[in-house]
Amino acid sequence: MSKEYLLAFETSCDETSVAVLQDSEIVSNVVYTQTIHQKYGGVVPEIASRAHMEKIVPVYLEALEKANIGMEHISAIAYTQSPGLIGSLLVGATFAKTLAQSRSLPLIEVNHIEAHAIANGISNPEIELPFLCLIVSGGHTEFRVCHSMTDTEVIGHTIDDAAGEAFDKIAKLLNLDYPGGPEIDKWAKRGNPNRFDFPISKVPDLDFSFSGIKTAVLQFLQRETKNNTNFIEDNLADICASVQYTIVQTLLAKYEKAVHQTGIHNLGIAGGVSANSALRSQFLEMCVKLNSKSYIPEFQYCTDNAGMIGFTAYHKWRLGKYSYDYTMTPSARA
Ligand code: KG4
Ligand code: ZN
């Protein structure tokens, strides 16, 4: 069978991204990150929708150009259907649907979080199934068992903030730029992770909670800055290292529990926070300790990108999981 091209759109949050795949191979993956949110210290939904509206056409054209093809070569179109900011999702969905309808092409709906997990297969085509994946991003923290590349099951999730949200909100308390995760990661490299103690949340089963650490850090900073107004500046590296240590410990303690509970020893991490250097190295150590295989997507496929949407869509497409129903709508919730 000859290879076919697939076009994929990702617009669930603050990245406008379009990818072209030839079967499962990502040929181009253009990602535009909206920097305008930095001055607000977080993503402003209304501004995100408008920025997608501005960028979607140039990003789409660049993706086709980089792949060196035209729309006439495309055989199917995929888009992020859920979850995410509804205004942002609507921009990608409307664009994808209009293109598909005008060319009578099949549409493939993709769940963004499932795509983060399935992205582990991009650089590991021989990935063993089932595999267990911890997806840690700015909006989501959950465990998924991937029974196949098209069938995943959520077995635990956060009951409040996501891990990335905790990084971002704590970074804001420390006067660091948005997104805060990479900033904390950078400062933590020079700090002592055992200098300050923050609580590890106790939530039953395989669920998480990250609102407690945010409050604990807030109260700690209020207390300490009363005595020393330069406390944050004087101790930034140690605070970052201690916060990062606590978040990573929280995630990996649950991960060990998930491994024991499921008996699965093919383990992955995914999502923006999987770019965290401490999480990556300690996850690999955990896998060695548990005698498990480890998978981490390449850096460019960890944060939001349309390549992972297209890769996930490819597997659905091949199993007939597509539609010519152009009335489908996106959903903010998973
Ligand atoms: O998956 P992603 O790009 O977007 C969402 O779907 O949310 O994840 C973005 C999140 C942000 O919260 C960002 O702070 C976090 O990933 N992040 C990191 C690192 N790089 C990105 N968190 C910790 N350490 C990093 N190196
Ligand atoms: Zn994401």
Image (cartoon, rainbow, N blue to C red):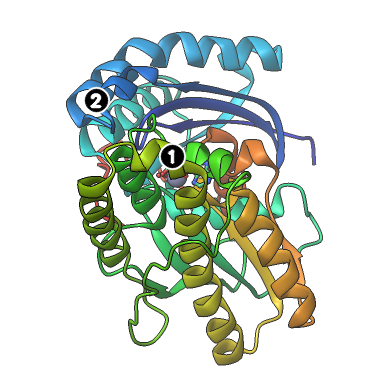
Look at the picture and state if 143 lies above or below 137: below
Counting from the top left corner in percent of width and height, residue 160 is at 25, 64
Residue 261 is labelled as none
Q: Tag 1, which secondary structure?
A: helix
Q: Quadrant of residue 300?
A: top right
Q: Quadrant of residue 155?
A: bottom left
Q: Tag 2, which secondary structure?
A: helix
Counting from the top left corner in percent of width and height, residue 3 is at 76, 35
Mark 2 is surrounded, within 10 Å at the Cα level, by few (under 14), some (14 to 19) or many (20 or more) other residues, namely: few
Q: Residue furthest front?
A: 227
Q: Nearer the viewer, residue 156 or 329?
A: 156
Residue position for label 2: 40
- From this viewpoint, is residue 85 visible? yes
Q: Nearer the viewer, residue 327 or 186?
A: 186
Under mark 1, the amino acid is Asp
Counting from the top left corner in percent of width and height, residue 221 is at 27, 51
